[in-house]
Image (cartoon, rainbow, N blue to C red):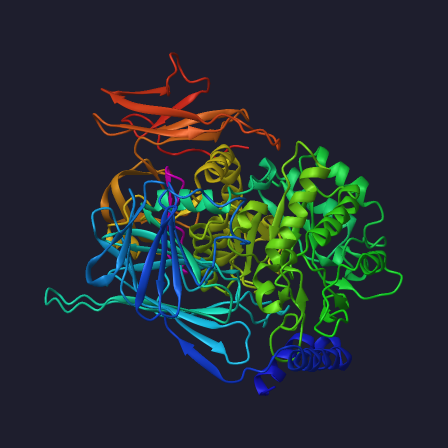
Amino acid sequence: MDGRDLVRWARVWGAGGAARGLRGVRAAWRRRRADALGLPPRGAERARVPGAVREAEPGPGGGVIRFARAELRVAVAPNGAVFLGWDGAGPLPSYALAGACPEPDPRAALEPDKDGGWRVVAERVTVAVSRFGGIEVRTPGGVTLRRELPPRWWEPVGGGPARWTQRAETAPDARVFGLGAWAEGPRLRAGRYRLWNAGRVPGPSGDGRPGPAMPVQLVVADAGTHLVFHDSSWDGTVVLSEGEEGAGSGHDRPATCEVRMEGGPLRCWVVVGSPARVLRVWASLTGGAALPPAWALGHQLAPGDRGDEREVRRLVAEYRTRGLPLDAVHLGAGHADRQRVFTVDRERFPKLPVLAGELRREGVRLVSFVEPAVRAEPGYAVFEGGGAEDVFVRGASGRRVEGLARPGAAVYPDFTHARVRAWWGAQYTERLAQGFAGFWHEGDEPVSFAAFGENTLPRSARHALEGRGGDHREAHNVYALCMARAAHESLRALTPGERPFVVSGSGWAGSQRHGGLWAGGAVAGWPGLRASLSLVLGLGLSGVPYAGADPGGGEGGSSPELSLRRLQLQAYLPLFRTRSGAGGEPWEWAAEVREHARAALLERRRLLPYFLTLAHLARRTGAPYVRPVWWGAPEDRGLRDCEDAFLLGDCLLVAPVLEPERDRRTVRLPRGRWYDTATGRAYEGPGKVVVEAPLARIPVLARAGAVLPVRGADGGVELEVWAPGRGRTGGGFFVPEGGGGSDEPVVERYVARRHGGRVLVRGHGAEGEPPYPVRVRGLPGTSGACPPQM
């Protein structure tokens, strides 16, 4: 414990008095003692490398290559995904993969390679293994995308999990994205990135990273794009360094990536192809994203813990009276009785089911805050019931692990056990009876506050890990994923015909199967806008398309301009949740921004059919709603370095204003014609253009030829078509579904073609006109502006 720990703890708990502070100190010492007694001391270690190759044995999809001190399994799936497993590591069991592992490609062949090495040749990829265990991943044309150096293990002399390191080289021009949610992204610069989900300390000076970390990298270079996933949930670090081109001298310095894991199997997946193909294959491995209910794509409000039933009714009534869209209200930890999970404070919410029913009839859902920490209080039903069922995490000594959370002394369910997930899922029956329609998980890293050290459970805490057994070192990163799984699977059974709404504050690779992720407060002030965009882009490129972030970063107040620019950005992110801060609601803002805030909210409502379409496409294809501008042209180096704009699906390019006092901004455009949706002015890409960005709006540009499903003035759907260039075609998709049902609707495809001074729009394979009104933009004599509609 040092001075920084004391300062941090004083800031967080100072208002709570000395008693809280003392509990935090005790909790930290208790955890430190548990680890000292429950974990074997790290003593002498011996280093190991594979050594020289001895033999190779062909097998399904590739084969096994044996070295002097290790063996490597290479298996290629029919979709081109490559599995690499050292020392007998197989693809399963895995928390990331969905269901059974893909069958190996029978056409992939193991062949001798030069200098005593071996290679596996498949239709979409070639994997070459050198004599001493180095691995090259090549395109079908023979271009090397990734070169893995021989791995290295450090094994405890007395036995136990081995640490390992694997270093890789990529092209000097390569750019790395992903690794979950990072405020420093979306492009990840040289530096260290820790793969450990850190709990945030509540309060304006809280520490902890803002979002979940995942060992999923998307690497983009001139030669091609590839994804690599190291399937180990242990604590780890990724160290990146940037490459340098030799300006024609031939002395290029490759970019490097070193993955260091404290344990777990050394196994990984590699996928080669375009960004769209890579994420489609990744989704096929880890599962399609859970489809949010239609209402969850609208405006959601988190008023915090202030107020009661009367305050919630007042807020909703104000939104309705002023004609502002509102689809959900999130009730925080304060709505529970003494912050005990699965309870209600009857003084503040005496008739919660009645309130929920009234709001639902008005089109507004209630979302409940849920955390895994269960208050250790005799007589509390959840605590007593969990104790009777033996669901709580125990330490190495066999005693229940007790931590410190919002409700005070707390215990934690072991979600890595199927029986515990079923027990926890049954608790949501109480929430549904209260009228809640969705659930927001927080503190699910899991969080256990301490005056010093990490804010989580002791690393020696024992977990079931689906019957394999292990400790918190392995279970920590997947704890939130397993909690989301418990909720999602239970809600599907409890509410058949409705899509569960589960949003988690933490997660891991594969979390998209069970719901969305909320990256939380990123950074305060104007930098928070850029950081929140990075968080959502990073999660999308890691396989989690439905995500959001809070650009406020826990900031108590902001200028009218910052509040407006924050709202304008959030209105185009998949999970659109605003919070009531010191600035109040939009109608309480300064007069100069009040109407502009209204326009941003109404524009989100107008785009709801498009967002719903993107949700369905993300589930089927793995393509995120929010994409980097290089998505369709990863070979464009200028686009690869563009981090202040994004594509919303295939049709729109959004350029948020991320700095104060700006009424114009530069936008880098991909190839093709782009229309300013507010003015109708056309711009030609690729290249940089300067566009108007008045306080009233942020620049949004539509791709020429785009067919965009939007909400019309009458509340129905219409197709907004942006004119393609002469002799060119365009198109778009629409999913005609507006409820929360679980059926998979048909995706409609529309094609737009320029014919003289007209634009013709036809459904793919259809004989007649589209069944929706069509509004053409971008032709001479038409208005480019699209007025917001309720």
453 and 324: which is toward the camera: 453
- The furthest residue to the left: 249
Figure quadrant of the N terminus:
bottom right
Main secondary structure type of the part rendered in magenta: loop
Q: Position of residue 320 (x, y in %)?
A: 65, 38
The reply to whether residue 573 is in sight is: no
Q: Position of residue 275 (x, y in %)?
A: 34, 46
The reply to whether residue 690 is in sight is: yes
| Residue 618 in the image: above or below residue 302 | above
401 and 574: which is toward the camera: 401
Q: Position of residue 638 (x, y in %)?
A: 25, 54
- The furthest residue to the right: 379
326 and 269: which is toward the camera: 269
Provide the residue span drawn in magenta: 644-663
542 in magenta:
no
User: Which residue corresponds to the image point at 34% horizontal and 28% vertical from the top-left?
Assistant: 731
User: Which residue corresponds to the image point at 21% horizontal and 53% vertical from the top-left?
Assistant: 143
Q: Position of residue 89 (x, y in %)?
A: 47, 59
Q: Quadrant of residue 36?
A: bottom right
| Residue 741 in the image: above or below residue 7 | above
Figure quadrant of the C terminus:
top right
User: Which residue corresponds to the image point at 69% horizontal and 42% vertical from the top-left?
Assistant: 491
Residue 134 left/right relative to 411: left
Q: Quadrant of residue 497?
A: top right
Residue 501 left/right relative to 51: right
558 and 387: which is toward the camera: 387
647 in magenta:
yes
User: Which residue corresponds to the image point at 37% horizontal and 46% vertical from the top-left?
Assistant: 61
